[in-house]
Image (tube, helix red, strand yellow):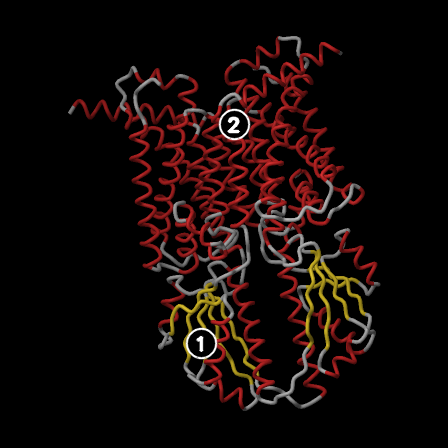
Amino acid sequence: MENWDAKWRRIWALTRKETRQILRDPSSIAIGIVFPLMMILLFGYGLSLDVTKVSVAVVDQDRSANSAGLIAAFRLSPYFKLTPPRSMAEATTQVLTRKVDGILQIPSNFSRRWHEGTAEIQILVDGTDANQARIMQGYAAGPVVIWSAAQQGLGTSVTGGTAIVVSRVWFNAANDSHYFIVPGLIVLVMTIIGGFLTAMVVAREWERGTLEALFVTPMRAGEFLISKFVPYFGLGMIGFVLCLLAAELLFHVPLRGSLSLLFLASMVYLVVALGIGLLVSTLVKSQFLASQLAMLLTFLPAMMLSGFIYDLRSMPAAIRAITYVLPARYAVALLQTLFLAGNVGSVIWLNLGVLALMAVGLLLATRLATHKRIT
Amino acid sequence: MRSSLLRILALIRKEFLAVLKDPRSRFIIFLPPVLQCLIFGYAATFDLNSISYAVLDQDHSAASTALIARLDGSGIFKRQADLSRAEDIATWVNASRALLVIQIDQDFERNLRAGAAAPVEVIADGRNSNTAGTALGYFNQVVEDFNSDWRSNHGQVSRSVRILNRSWYNPNLDSSWSIIPSLIGTLTMMGTLMLTALSVAREREQGTFDQLLVTPFRPYEIMIGKAAPNMVIGLAQSTTVLLVAQFWFRIPFVGSFAVLYGGLTLFLMAAVGLGLLVSSIAKTMQQAMLYAFLLVMPFALLSGLATPFSSMPDVLQTVMIINPLRYALDLTKRVYLEGAGLRVLVPDFAPLVIIGMVTLTGAAWLFRRRLT
């Protein structure tokens, strides 16, 4: 089997060349090691959907014991930081200049109407950040309910039958947004290492003409691809392990599923990401175009259409249909489930199966697109 | 002076040709902003329009039926199953088939009639804790309405305070109104910074940059020749997104175009400056792209685009002083939605001018030094 021997020697030589090219290029090391760490630290700490301490200007036009009590209830809430009572005009200016996030207005007839049972207060928010505004409106209900309940307990003995919501949030009892952001970040990191970095490697050889030099050697297309694939796979797995360590040691994200399944899932996803990168690179043969396409096909979907920050369930049906074509959604579902829920068979095998099919399809497509031919 | 101007113009012309000559790269400059704007305009939302839930009703009373009917009638809650055993709850939640599982105990109605507290247990799938929180919020709202109806139907008196919510500049608190104006800056920065970083790196890789250095061009002329075309392309990208925002999403523009474009020009100066700085450090195109990417990523995600800027730790808020996108987001949103004028926008304009000046002079200086 002298033939086999030669084949593996060729693959080995090319792989070694590719690995050296990575090791000697500071930017590749940056993306393999610095980048995962930077991502997980910056975004792990930086991305938080938990709105705390909304600053609110209080305009108390009633100036009664009732309004003072209600304001005290707001002051006790951990979500609000109240600024001293001011005139409505002054409060409006404060919102416009971003000194406060909103206004709590208690109208002058508040006490009178409270006794009639029709009291109203007004919450005014700046809607330019719709999400923050909505969260703030939600928070405001808390102190109001607490105050009115306490008030009725004191005043009259009437209490109505009340359905009380006892809620439990499974998998994330502490309601810590890191728990779902960190698994998503791991997917993002692998997407970038796999898809983005490899998008340029084949295109670079086309642009520099070194691929034509390889044509005249006995090397075959498949061997060439393996040699491109292996080093970047290694780089991606290093990134994955670093992220995993950070997730466990820094953010204490629980790992309820099995570690081996987590590795399997990540490896399969990494193959998919590498497949996209290599395919793009092989097809467009230009580094600039390859980089832009890779951004469009891998990074942006992984960030926006994967369920990493924005939940897929919030999206309109047409957009959700697009996400089914993109591998990132399956990877995010897999990792979030493996980290937070455990080995849930139905979720894991379905998503892993789709990813495996995508991996095989992409590798075959790349193999078919690689010709030893000058165009 | 005149010859300097002519040289710069020649370089600008050559830059435009280099980028716009290839139909594929024309395509890649203008198609992605439109596509991304459309997709993200719909995808980047925290509003939940549909909440799948399963119910375990152990009471089977008029009251429990009324509560469930209220959920189904909300248009948001979609009942997936009526469970009969408590053991089924885990199956439905684990497999992500229901976001909420609602469990109504058998004394639900009896407690209500007795005027006591009647617990309703809700289990939420917390794999995305933000979604779980939103869903629970909607559920609380439905139960709140149920309570006040129940009381008035059963002659139980209760006083409550009604909260009137009003929001300025975005009356329906539509997520797309805050996201899409933000995309003007974000998508433009992603495109322009990369394009700029690659334009010098390509010349370096192909060896033409060395040739440029032996011509009469002065470093600042090269800098202007490289910066101006990319800024123009960036403004064109911004305009594309702006058109999509107005004619597809129909978000009313209340500000002044002069102020908006003034701000965008300063922003592009800063973005192109960063791109040139990156490209003067990088040796190959792959390096330039990676460094640009390492810069764009944190800038985009930590600008307040995805999560509120004020929720970030103080240290990061301080570090992000150097992030041009942060000012661009603030200024585009405020001009677009609030109609803010020049005077209020000084805190956004001033840092952009400083970032632009520092990066552009830095790049011009580095052009001369980095001859290898």
Please state the horizontal and vertical placement of residue A88, each as a whole percent of the image. 82, 62
Residue positioned 60% across, 85% down in the render: B152
Residue for badge 2: B26
Distance from disc 2 to disc 1, alpha carbons, whole Å, reads 57 Å
Who is closer to the viewer here, A20 or A164?
A164
The lab-note entry on whether marks 2 and 1 share a chain reads yes
The local crowd at label 1, few if under 14, some if 14 to 19, many if 20 or more residues have their Cα within 10 Å, is many
Q: Quadrant of residue B280?
A: top right
Amino acid type shown at disc 1: Gln
Q: Would you call the spot at circle 2 few (<14 residues within 10 Å), some (14-19), or many (20 or more)?
A: few
Name the residue located 24 percent from the left edge and 24 percent from the top edge.
Answer: A7
Q: Residue at x 70, y 24 (%)?
A: B361
Q: In the image, which is nearer the foreground, mark 2 or mark 1?
A: 2
Query: Of the residues shown, which amino acid type is indicated by label 2?
Result: Arg
Q: Is mark 2 on a helix, strand or loop?
A: helix
**Left-right relation of A18 to B215:** left
Mark nearer the N terminus (2 vs 1): 2
Which disc, if any, is residue B103?
1
Horizontal arrangement in the rendering, residue A266 relative to residue A100 (left or right): left
Residue B272 drawn above or below residue A211: below
> Mark 1, chain letter?
B
For this rendering, which residue is in front, B177 or A237?
B177
Mark 2 belongs to chain? B
